[in-house]
Structure formats: structure tokens, C-alpha cells
Image: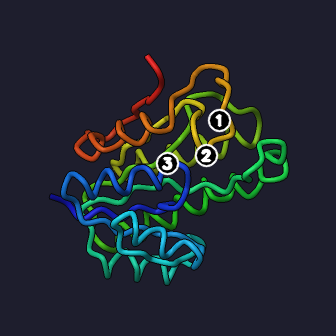
Amino acid sequence: MMRVFVAGASGVIGIRLVPLLVDVGHDVAGMTRSPDKVELLKRLGAFPVVCDVFDRAALQAAVVDFNPDAVVSEVTDLPDDREQLHDFEAANDRMRREGTRNLLDAAAAAKVPRFLAQSIAWELPGERGKAVDAAERMVLEANGVVVRYGQLYGPGTFYESELPDPPRVHVDAAAERTIALLEAKSGVVTVTDA
């Protein structure tokens, strides 16, 4: 059994991952930046933590206080409507660069031995691709695991009733396959449909 701190716990993967972790016996802290999500996280079995990943001091205090064996980053800054994706590019790039750095620093302060961070299994052009590369490099330099998910489909995703172009993975399968990665060695793991 581990103590697992999940950042982005109220996101599309997080809300599936948290109860799966609880079901296999882990103690889970679920971090969200929205106070409105506290009751949801409690229902999922997590100890809710309301914190903004960009508030370095509060984030570090939250991670240190929970004293986890692993930190899992599922943080993104994406819209509910995929037609608005372009409007969120800069915010999501900041999440990848600065949010990842802040989570890694908080994990280091808490002497957490395991760190997993979500990434993507397809290429993005220009600055967006540079943000992905920077986040992955930070995670690998900290001996963490980069989880490159395919485009998510299924309930609550941008592709609820249609399949996105490959690489892709059903959101439930993405969450399920993440659990075993808590034991993975540092490196890059791609999670896509077979």
C-alpha cells in the first residue's frame, strides 16, 4: 500500500484514477484547484486538497503534509469544449512547464521516491511541442516516469461518441493502466490502444 498524491484529481483521468487507487488499497490525496470539487473527491475516496499548482508555497506544504510515496501529475488546463482548445494553448503550455516544475519541486521537498506525469503520444508543432518536451525532460531528469497517453475518448472527453485519430486510448483504460506505472522505472511509457 502506498500514499499517492494525485494532482489534477478532478480531471478526466483523475476522477477515474483516484477510485481505482483507493480500491487497490492506496491512501490517496486528490488535489484540485476548485473548492467545488471537494465533495466529489471525498466521494471518490480521496483526502481532498484544494491548491493551485502555481502557488509554490501552498503546493509544497500540501505535498509535504501528506508525505506521499508517489506523486502523480494529471494536471492540464483545457476547456470543456474542444472547439475552444486554441484559446487554452498558452495556459496549458504554462501548466506543462511551470506546473510540472512546481510539482517536481514539491515532491523533492517531501523526498517522494516516485513521480509520474501525464504527457501526450502525438507531436505538437512549435512552442506547444517545446512545452511538452520541456515537461518531459524535467520529469526524466528527476528520475520520474513520463506517461504518454493517446488522445482520450469515452465519457467526459472531447470524443464521447466518436473515435479520434490515432494514437488514441479509451479514458478508462488510460486510468487503469496508470496504476501499474507506480512501480515503473524512470522512462517514457506510451499508453494507447493496441
Q: Amino acid at mark 3?
A: Ile
> Which residue corresponds to the image point at 18% horizontal and 57% vertical from the top-left?
25
Residue at position x 31%, y 65% from top?
28
| Count of numbered labels shown in the rendering | 3
Residue 156 shows which numbered tag?
2
Observer-side mark, 2 or 3, equals 2
Q: Are marks 1 and 2 in contact (CB under 8 Å)?
A: yes
Residue placed furthest toward the top:
194
Give residue 160's mark. 1
Kindly indicate the quadrant of the structure image that contains residue 21.
bottom left
Q: Which residue ends up furthest to the left in the rendered image? A: 1
Judge from the rendering whether residue 153 lies leftward or rightward of residue 27; answer left or right: right
Q: Callout 3: helix, strand or loop? A: loop
In the rendered view, does 120 fall on the left or right side of 40?
Answer: right
> Residue placed at 64% from the left, 23% from the top?
163
Looking at the picture, tell me which residue is in the foreground, 192 or 172: 172
- State how far apart marks 1 and 3 are (Cα): 14 Å
- The residue tagged with tag 2: helix, strand or loop? loop
Question: Which three-letter amino acid code belongs to the residue tagged 2?
Answer: Gly
